[in-house]
Amino acid sequence: MISDDTVESSAESPAVVERRPTFIDRYAQRIAGAFLLCHALMIAWGAYRHSPTFDEVAYLPAGVSHWELGRFDLASVSPPLVRLVAAIPVVLSEHETEWRHYDTSPSTTPAHEVGRDFTVVNGERTFWLFTIARWACIPFSLIGGYVCFAWGRALYGSHSGILACGLWCFSPNVLAHAQLMTPDVGTTALGVAAAYTFWQWLREPSWRSTLLAGFVLGLAELAKTTLIVFFALWPLMWLMSRCLPRRTDVSLPIRRELSQIGVMLVFALYLLNMGYGFQGSLTRIREYAFVSHTLAGDYGEADGGNRLAAWGLGAVPVPFPRNYILGLDSQKRQLDNHSGRQRSYLASKWQSHGWWYYYLYALAIKVPLGTWVLLLLAIFARPPIDDGRERRLGELVIITTLLLILTLVSAQTGFNHHMRYALPIFPFAFVFVSRVASRWGTRPVRLRSLVTMAALWTFASSVWIYPHSLSYFNELVGGPKGGHAHLVDSNIDWGQDLLLLREWLDDHPEARPIGIAYFGNIDPAIAGVDAPLPPGSEPTDAGETDFPTKPSRDLSPCDYGPQPGWYAVSVNYLRGVTWNTGRNLTYFQHFEPVDRVGYAIMIYHITPQDADRVRQQLGLPALESCAATESEPR
């Protein structure tokens, strides 16, 4: 293992021969270890406190099916590694399964149906099963934090390594998704780990570093299909690296390096296929029926098609597992959103497609302002370090990977729901930002003070909202209380606060009876929260939704609009989502909440006077008039 002093010296100017190690140099690993321990404890507590989020309900039983049925059909839109890890403690524990909705199609619908069945048959125990599944995934986030530390330290010194590690450990977006068993943090951590090992191979090509990079890349590819771009990106970056000055003691003939990168990619591809048990590997193209417009062509999504077979490529075997390809195709169908079925929300506006700047906007308001200050300083306050080949290689890998992933996700404008799709860029940004702490002792006092304050601002801003990190928004939009005016869905309200709602109801018996509009993929009755939906504002499909439910047309105007009483309303419904309700509940924006549960559920107590005021604005009859109508004999 490389010592702190050695790494620190390599990050400094060649003119510096000897330098007394500082406290940070001597204890860098211990400080990083303390950060990671704190990070793990924060993740574990948040995982315990929150109810299963929307996609988790589908992913956990899918992971169980991989182990118990030996199949990878369910939730195939993403590879199975994270689900397999999450399901281990569940498979080893007492649990029930229900497979009556199991379907081999690549659609996400069967996974969600099986997931809801899973929660029903396990009842209250569901919440414990999801908790231990989440805990099993904590090592993924620890890997990400350690790689940030190791890479930042190797490039810029010990101070930078600690800063990069701290940014990872206290990032509200990392904390939010590390509390879950969805593949986002696993993908992010393994993605940066793969890039780090590839950089190590670029700086010192050897067969050992070749196999290590191939192994980690294979694991990363088993986390999410987004990282398939690494198969093309790495050879490109290798070619770019050949243009940089090379040390003669590590230089290899181009044919040797070419053979090594070939083995690296083939090894990763082998591991990807092995992760699926080689099921459907080398299936010929003509045997696929695709559903995305990109691969199916003009055959239509319902019947499927095969554009590639029509081009005469039908006999070509595909070197990927069948379910990997079908999942990639299914995800592309969702992202294309040709039907306009999935509508997108940004800054109080709904439309049938996304925005190219969605992720830039989301990052601007979901990343702590202190982190943005650090990024600006890293860009404009050039560090007093040499531009040796290793550092140039590192920044080549970091910046190229970051920009490619951000461009890739931003190009998917069929629909936009989730800033988490851009999460894989975070560790690369953290390592780049850490350059601002290089040669710490030689930097101006004013700059050091500014960096310290920006870092503390980042950490304090994140800890202030913890454990509700999923709902984090920075001060530009008024924090999490103002977030739902800009973003919805997994950016703020993904069904995570059901258990907290139960606690609130236990503490407020005066709020019974209550109407509840909970956005989640689990029946609230499983948590003991059983209540009717609030009335909608009109007998139409008003509002935007992924999967509209037709409301009843047999009701009178008196049955719609505000009614006196207590209500708990998820902010997604507050902003116009109608999923699973078929009701427009945006009229709750006319009322001031009396309390909130986390930052995802608002509590309202509507008086008759308040109800009539808003009913008048909506053109609905007053409550007194409705009461008189009901009392008339029929």
Image (spheres, rainbow, N blue to C red):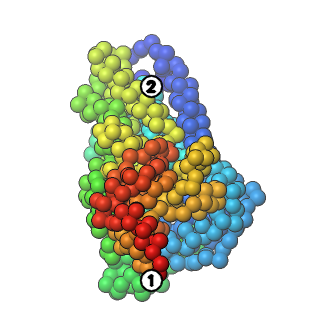
- Element type where label 1 sits in the image: loop
Q: Residues at badges 2 and 1 in contact (C-beta under 8 Å)?
A: no
| Badge count | 2
**View extreme (top): residue:** 20
Q: Position of residue 303 (x, y in %)?
A: 42, 87
Task: Give the residue pinned by disc 1.
Answer: 289
Choose between 105 and 226: the one closer to the eye: 105
Local packing at callout 1 (Cα closer than 10 Å; few below 14, some 14-19, many 20+) is some
Residue 487's label in the rendered image is none
Q: In this view, does 511 lie to the left or right of 591?
A: right
Q: Can residue 57 be seen in this view?
A: no
Q: Where is residue 550 in the image (x, y as percent from the top left)?
A: 43, 76
Q: Is residue 88 left or right of residue 575?
A: right
Residue at horizontal 49 percent and vertical 59 percent from the top: 517
Choose between 241 and 325: the one closer to the eye: 325
**View extreme (front): residue:** 633
Which quadrant would residue 90 be assigned to in this image? bottom right
Q: Position of residue 18 (x, y in %)?
A: 41, 14
Q: Is residue 591 visible?
A: yes
Q: What residue type is labelled 2?
A: Ser
- Element type where label 2 sits in the image: helix
Q: How far apart are marks 2 and 1 (CA)?
A: 52 Å
Residue 158's label in the rendered image is 2
